[in-house]
Image: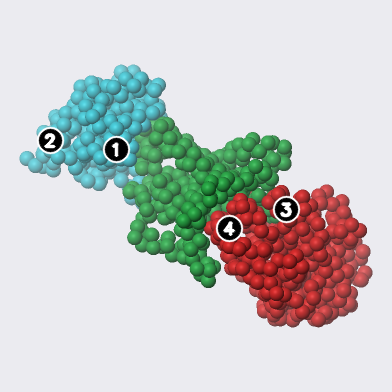
Chain colours: A red, B green, C cyan
């Protein structure tokens, strides 16, 4: 019985890797996570990308002549497995590789693709040093940590906060570096750091940390953290439980239904995210189309983000007018002001981390309220 | 002093959850020598059951009941389907089987339910704060402590006042002789799994109440902590598991509270070091069982 | 069926992997008999008893207890049918109290008699246990633990009691008390299959005996005949 289930599952994955490629097909290899810790990020991105690919293929392929074939292999959220899968995809003739939503496996895969001269794009790795670690064939498809941090710092200063406490976790680059970038940007603009606390991811216990914050005299004006589920809900519950009402700034990791389900606990929390559907915006239109297609409203921005990746690929191949990987790489690197559903996307002039709009959203009575949208002043962005 | 008292309360609340988890592992280990790494998935199952019961429109208390019932049933099914066929096999076989059960369940959750966390709406009344003089106690923290004490007391009564409980204690000592009393091995093992399912369900409830969501990998970390706590206490000893759970919670909170800031990132390393130190002096754990497991 | 033996075994083999501990023995015990199994260490005596109650891997052409086939049955089922074993080394539940040990002994046997009455009877017969009722079994002396182990087995009101080395490791005067007890059980009509190293005392108590060597039956017969046989005299009784 157990064996049958396993066979069924592996059969389902094998079926995703579709028929052999035609001569003029663009072959995209997906070395991304169907299972494991990165699946929550990779799966919605993949779903969005697949929607865009279907649209492109329905219109006769990119520029009417390059239909897209995908080969999808599960990395199980494991870096070594990601490198292995990337090699298999390169061997299978992929002209473009998509890597998971995290810098570590993306670097592992990038070591293979860089050597093979094939461009690789991470679904949503946010670590700004990712392309530096791999090379000029590595890109990401998401606003970088330091860009989000700069937006949040600008907001903090505008809100009149003088002192900030940052809560970091050394367990991931995202949870460690983003608050530290925030600290750099905030102090550069005249703010002061009141302290830095740490936590272990997944631990869910903030009792000791919260007791320390509650005992601070004076209390900081604002607390900034990149903690996300399950840590963020546990933190905010325990912080408010200890009677600390200090405002909280968060980052895109908490843009999830869970956060909005926390009610009064998160009232007034401001966080950065990759997109906000204002009335009449492309994102609103996309959300409607997605809802129509699947019967459920998108529960995360990662779906639209994956969809935009399809648009990036389309634009890059159109510009290259060829399926030569080097030409595709140049096509990506020269994109400028490409209109995606989440906003304008620019790779030109960057090292591979795109300039994309960041939205700041305030939670008000369980709803989103847009605080700011756009890109920070490049001078305010902390160096990676 | 107030801060120290507050940290003690924090330690009590965290340690209590660890104690419930470790106890769940120890109950099964004491009877059949299996460290059930799928114990964490029983927590996850509880979370999903509560979540879907709420979506289905059940009031919160009923949803909690449903969650606990599902945890017990899931534990019994696990025993029947996966562990009974390998009962009496070597410890390694049992361990690998439990890893397999855990991995299969995670993949099923990810592919049949959702890879993304699903929110569970915890009633606002559980977000309240109790203030006693200078001390603040979150409702959930308070409930954790109370529920832990009730569970420990209840389990103690069960083990000492009922025939099934006596049979479990006897089985932990000498399973073969228990069968000579005419008691069915299968029902004793099933009772152990049912209890461990209930303990996992309660711990899962407390865990989900803190985080407000369920995700497929939710059980991974707690089961690891439970394993450490059970090792500290002496594998297979029930009172040892409780002591180990509280000690681990205490160590973690005190380190978090009093380590200098520059060393805080290494807190878990220090915690494990202290655990190793305990084991150096008591290699069998704090309250080791005397007899080896045999079937 | 007065002539039908209580227990009738043909071709019993016990093997642990490649090691054959018992090699095809035949064995019968009639109702009301005391039968003893004798033999050197490793002859296969304990393996035979364990196999009878399903605690050792066994094969047999025929295994009948009270006329029913018990060959493939689980230990607990066999015990519920009325055959139980007091294992070697006593194996009382040492962290449970004396009373709890007795309760577990009678846990599944309400159908075979009134457990409360059996317990009262037991405490009358073993006054030392009545004194220590709430003490942990592990705190009893070796002799007291053996009493408890036997009393615990009797709580199930068995039709056939298997005793595995009840006198092992006990002081001489305690050994005498254990044999007094077995004699007393015999006089009350209980059927007993006894494995013992104390050959002289067990042949004195028994009606019949088997002598095992290397997993096979070497000798069998009435206890008095065995006692008189030169092999037994040489090997065990040191005459």
| Crowdedness near tag 4: few (<14), some (14–19) or many (≥20) residues, C-alpha within 10 Å | many
Nearer the observer: mark 1 or 4; the answer is 4
**In-front residue for pair A58/A269:** A269
Q: CA distance from mark 1 to mark 4?
A: 50 Å
Q: Which residue is mark 2?
A: C173
Write down the quadrant of residue A319 in the picture: bottom right
Task: Residue at the far left: name it.
Answer: C239
**In-front residue for pair C207/A147:** A147
Q: Please, what secondary structure does the residue beneath circle 4 have?
A: helix
| Crowdedness near tag 2: few (<14), some (14–19) or many (≥20) residues, C-alpha within 10 Å | few
| Crowdedness near tag 3: few (<14), some (14–19) or many (≥20) residues, C-alpha within 10 Å | some
Q: Is residue A307 left or right of residue B252?
A: right
Q: Are marks 2 and 3 on the same chain?
A: no
Q: Is residue C155 left or right of residue C213?
A: right
**Sequence-earlier tag: 1 or 2:** 1
Q: Which residue is mark 1?
A: C136
Q: CA distance from mark 4 to mark 3?
A: 19 Å
Give the x, y percent position of residue A7. 65, 53
Nearer the observer: mark 2 or 3; the answer is 3
Q: CA distance from mark 2 to mark 3?
A: 82 Å
Badge 3: chain ID: A
Q: Is residue A208 left or right of residue C7?
A: right
Q: Please, what secondary structure does the residue beneath circle 1 have?
A: loop
Label count reads 4
Which quadrant would the C terminus of chain A be assigned to in this image? Answer: bottom right
Nearer the observer: mark 2 or 4; the answer is 4
Give the x, y percent position of residue A23. 85, 72
Q: Which residue is mark 3?
A: A267
């Amino acid at each position: 019985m157990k064996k049958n289930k396993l066979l069924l599952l592996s059969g389902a994955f094998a079926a995703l890797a579709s028929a052999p490629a035609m001569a003029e097909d663009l072959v995209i290899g997906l070395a991304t996570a169907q299972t494991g810790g990165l699946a929550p990020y990779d799966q919605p991105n993949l779903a969005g990308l697949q929607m865009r690919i279907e649209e492109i293929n329905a219109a006769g392929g990119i520029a009417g002549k390059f239909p897209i074939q995908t080969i999808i292999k599960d990395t199980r959220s494991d870096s070594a497995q990601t490198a292995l899968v990337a090699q298999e995809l390169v061997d299978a003739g992929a002209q473009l590789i998509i890597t998971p939503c995290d810098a570590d496996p993306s670097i592992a895969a990038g070591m293979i693709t860089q050597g093979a001269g094939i461009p690789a794009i991470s679904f949503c790795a946010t670590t700004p040093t990712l392309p530096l670690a791999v090379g000029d064939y590595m890109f990401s498809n998401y606003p970088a940590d330091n860009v989000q941090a700069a937006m949040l710092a600008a907001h903090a200063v505008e809100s009149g906060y003088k002192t900030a406490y940052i809560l970091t976790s050394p367990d991931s680059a995202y949870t460690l570096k983003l608050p530290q970038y925030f600290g750099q940007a905030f102090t550069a603009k005249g703010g002061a750091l009141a302290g830095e606390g740490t936590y272990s991811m997944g631990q869910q216990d903030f009792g000791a940390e919260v007791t320390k914050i509650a005992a601070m005299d004076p209390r900081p004006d604002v607390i900034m953290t990149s903690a996300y589920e399950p840590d963020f809900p546990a933190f905010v519950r325990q912080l408010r439980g200890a009677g600390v009402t200090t405002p909280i700034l968060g980052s895109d990791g908490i843009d999830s239904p869970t956060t909005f389900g926390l009610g009064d606990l998160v009232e007034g929390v401001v966080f950065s995210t990759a997109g906000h559907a204002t009335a009449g915006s492309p994102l609103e239109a996309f959300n409607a189309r997605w809802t129509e297609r699947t019967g459920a409203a998108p529960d995360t921005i990662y779906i639209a983000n994956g969809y935009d990746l399809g648009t990036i690929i389309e634009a890059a191949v159109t510009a290259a007018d060829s399926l030569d990987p080097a030409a595709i790489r140049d096509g990506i690197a020269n994109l400028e002001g490409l209109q995606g559903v989440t906003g304008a996307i620019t790779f030109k002039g960057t090292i591979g981390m795109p300039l994309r709009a960041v939205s700041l959203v305030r939670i008000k009575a369980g709803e989103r309220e847009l605080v700011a949208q756009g890109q920070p002043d490049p001078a305010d962005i902390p160096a990676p | 002093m107030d801060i120290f008292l507050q940290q003690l309360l924090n330690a009590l609340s965290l340690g209590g959850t660890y104690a419930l988890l470790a106890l769940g592992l120890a109950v099964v280990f004491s009877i059949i020598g299996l460290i059930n790494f799928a114990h964490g998935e029983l927590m996850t199952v509880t979370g999903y059951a509560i979540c879907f019961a709420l979506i289905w429109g059940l009031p919160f208390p009923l949803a909690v009941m449903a969650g606990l019932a599902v945890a017990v049933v899931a534990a019994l099914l696990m025993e029947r389907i996966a562990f009974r066929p390998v009962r009496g096999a070597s410890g390694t076989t049992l361990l690998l089987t439990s890893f397999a059960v855990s991995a299969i369940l995670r993949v099923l959750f990810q592919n049949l339910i959702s890879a993304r966390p699903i929110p569970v709406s915890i009633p606002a009344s559980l977000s309240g704060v109790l203030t006693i003089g200078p001390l603040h106690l979150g409702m959930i923290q308070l409930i954790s402590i109370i529920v832990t004490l009730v569970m420990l007391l209840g389990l103690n009564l069960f083990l000492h006042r009922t025939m099934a409980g006596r049979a479990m204690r006897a089985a932990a000592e000498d399973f073969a002789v228990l069968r000579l009393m005419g008691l069915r091995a299968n029902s004793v093992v099933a009772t152990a799994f049912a209890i461990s399912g209930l303990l996992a369900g309660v711990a899962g409830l407390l865990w989900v109440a803190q985080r407000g969501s369920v995700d497929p990998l939710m059980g991974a970390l707690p089961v690891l902590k439970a394993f450490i706590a059970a090792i500290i206490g002496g594998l297979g000893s029930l009172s040892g598991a409780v002591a180990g759970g509280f000690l681990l919670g205490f160590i973690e909170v005190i380190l978090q509270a009093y380590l200098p800031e520059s060393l805080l990132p290494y807190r878990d390393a220090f915690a494990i070091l202290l655990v190793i130190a305990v084991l150096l002096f008591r290699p069998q754990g704090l309250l080791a069982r005397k007899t080896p497991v045999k079937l | 069926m007065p002539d039908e033996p209580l227990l009738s075994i043909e071709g019993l083999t016990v093997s642990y992997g490649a090691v054959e501990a018992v090699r095809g023995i035949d064995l019968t015990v009639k109702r009301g008999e005391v039968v003893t199994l004798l033999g050197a260490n490793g002859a296969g005596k304990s393996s035979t008893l364990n196999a009878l109650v399903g605690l050792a891997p066994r094969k047999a052409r025929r295994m009948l207890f009270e006329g029913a086939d018990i060959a493939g049955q689980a230990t607990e089922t066999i015990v519920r049918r009325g055959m139980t074993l007091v294992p070697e080394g006593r194996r009382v539940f040492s962290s449970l109290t004396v009373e709890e040990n007795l309760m577990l002994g009678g846990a599944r046997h309400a159908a075979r008699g009134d457990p409360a009455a059996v317990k009262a009877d037991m405490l009358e017969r073993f006054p030392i246990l009545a004194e220590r009722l709430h003490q942990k079994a592990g705190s009893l002396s070796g002799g007291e633990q053996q009493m408890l182990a036997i009393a615990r087995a009797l709580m199930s009101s068995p039709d056939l009691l298997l005793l595995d080395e009840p006198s092992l490791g006990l002081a001489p005067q305690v050994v005498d008390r254990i044999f007094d007890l077995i004699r007393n059980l015999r006089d009350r009509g209980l059927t007993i299959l006894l494995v013992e190293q104390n050959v002289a005392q067990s042949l004195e108590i028994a009606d019949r005996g088997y002598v095992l060597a290397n997993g096979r039956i070497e000798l069998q017969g009435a206890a008095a005949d065995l006692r008189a046989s030169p092999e037994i005299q040489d090997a065990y009784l040191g005459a």
